Image (tube, rainbow, N blue to C red):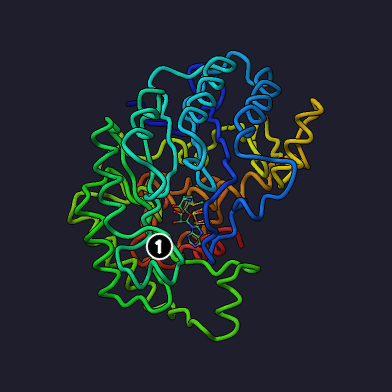
Amino acid sequence: MKHIESGPSETGRPALGVYVHVPFCSVRCGYCDFNTYTADELGEGATRASYADTAISEITMLAGRVAGRPVETVFFGGGTPTQLPATDLVRLLRAVDDLIGLAPGAEVTTEANPDSVDPEVLATLRAGGFNRISFGMQSAVPHVLATLERTHDPANVERAVRWAREAGFDQVSVDLIYGTPGESVEDWRTSVEHALSLAPDHVSAYALIVEQGTAFARKVARGEVVMPDDDETADKYVLADELFQDAGLRWYELSNWAVDGAARCRHNELYWTGGEWLGIGPGAHSYLDRRRWWNVKHPAAYAQRLAAAASPEADGEDIDDATAHVERVMLETRLRRGVRGVGLDSTAMEELLRRGLVTRERNRLVLTLRGRLLADAVVRDLLA
Ligand SMILES: C[S@@+](CC[C@H](N)C(=O)[O-])C[C@H]1O[C@@H](n2cnc3c(N)ncnc32)[C@H](O)[C@@H]1O
Ligand code: SF4
């Protein structure tokens, strides 16, 4: 499988990806502020049943802007893509292939909740061209899953991963969250070990973020739950990295580990290394020709625009050199292959080397383990 690096593809342009947002969930987890809606929240003017056709009309509208460029990666994210019938997800993928064109060996991922798939759904997706699946496992500890208000249990995850393998998915990833209130370091070890027992090709592990405006943030504000301190969260990162490494998974981005180069998420790598992408769906962002734009957020507004053959674009911005530099440093610093030193302040780089937060590998600075725990501060110093 080809591994995406920044820079031009065979067409002489940056590698191209397509992101398809599916804004539906059966239940909203209290901590989540993604652009997603339960049936109750959705209101009038948009339905799950009409979503695929609406999104296909957006793909039709945008296809001419990337004419002749093969799509290297497609990522269905949410929300919960598997809230749509698998046949609709396959129809959407076909539309990307028919209207734009998939590159040979394109990576096609869907996110899925562990309790939102069955063998038939997985077989339909695999037969329809999906080759990578990412399950939102989050934890293997029931009280942690309860605090996160997840609807699945650890047995759902085991089953879902087994079914995905049986359906022929080569690449299976699981997402974990650490730092949930009430989660001990031993709870976290249990979750990591459980995840590893599933032999995933890829793991993402994110520290729980308290997103303002969520039900969870209100609980934290009322003192009903208490967030762990930074030291404990750092200990959990170090523990996870150690356990992942012992199991043969290597970090390639701060929150992402893979068994080998072919198991990395090429779609996310495209975001991090200067690729371009079309974002389909309400609230989705696109990036093309140094311009970023984003769609209207609500599925009903999105559907209305497309029904009137109007663009769903809400707004956009041109990315000037200064913004591109800041974004490059922010994203590259998080990568195992490191941030290119070009354009960076040499005094700041020397100071970070002296403090043991980075090492130098040819013309790049690479975070040490201590640096990974202080990555935001490293970025700030590099941009100061
Ligand atoms: C948008 S979700 C989609 C996957 C699927 N709906 C699920 O939750 O299983 C993608 C991932 O974002 C992460 N996530 C969402 N909200 C988060 C938060 N507040 N803090 C940390 N990670 C979060 C979760 O790990 C989740 O698996
Ligand atoms: S974490 Fe996943 S399942 Fe939960 S509300 Fe967010 S997108 Fe939906």
Depth order, front residue of 130/365: 130
Q: From the viewer's perspective, is residue 107 above or below residue 113?
A: above
- Is 75 positioned to the left or the right of 213 in the image? left
* Residue labelled with disc 1: 177
Tag 1: residue type?
Answer: Ile
- Is 303 positioned to the left or the right of 275 in the image? right
User: Residue placed farthest to the bottom in the image?
Assistant: 223
The part of the image, by quadrant, that contains residue 196 is bottom left
Q: Is the C-beta of the residue carrying label 1 under 8 Å from the nearest atom of ligand 1?
A: yes
Depth order, front residue of 217/25: 25
Q: From the viewer's perspective, is residue 311 above or below residue 315?
A: above
Q: Is residue 354 visible?
A: no
* Residue 210 percent coordinates (x, y): 55, 70
Q: Residue drawn 30% across and 33% down? A: 169
Q: Residue drawn 35% across and 34% down? A: 122
- Is 199 positioned to the left or the right of 217 in the image? left
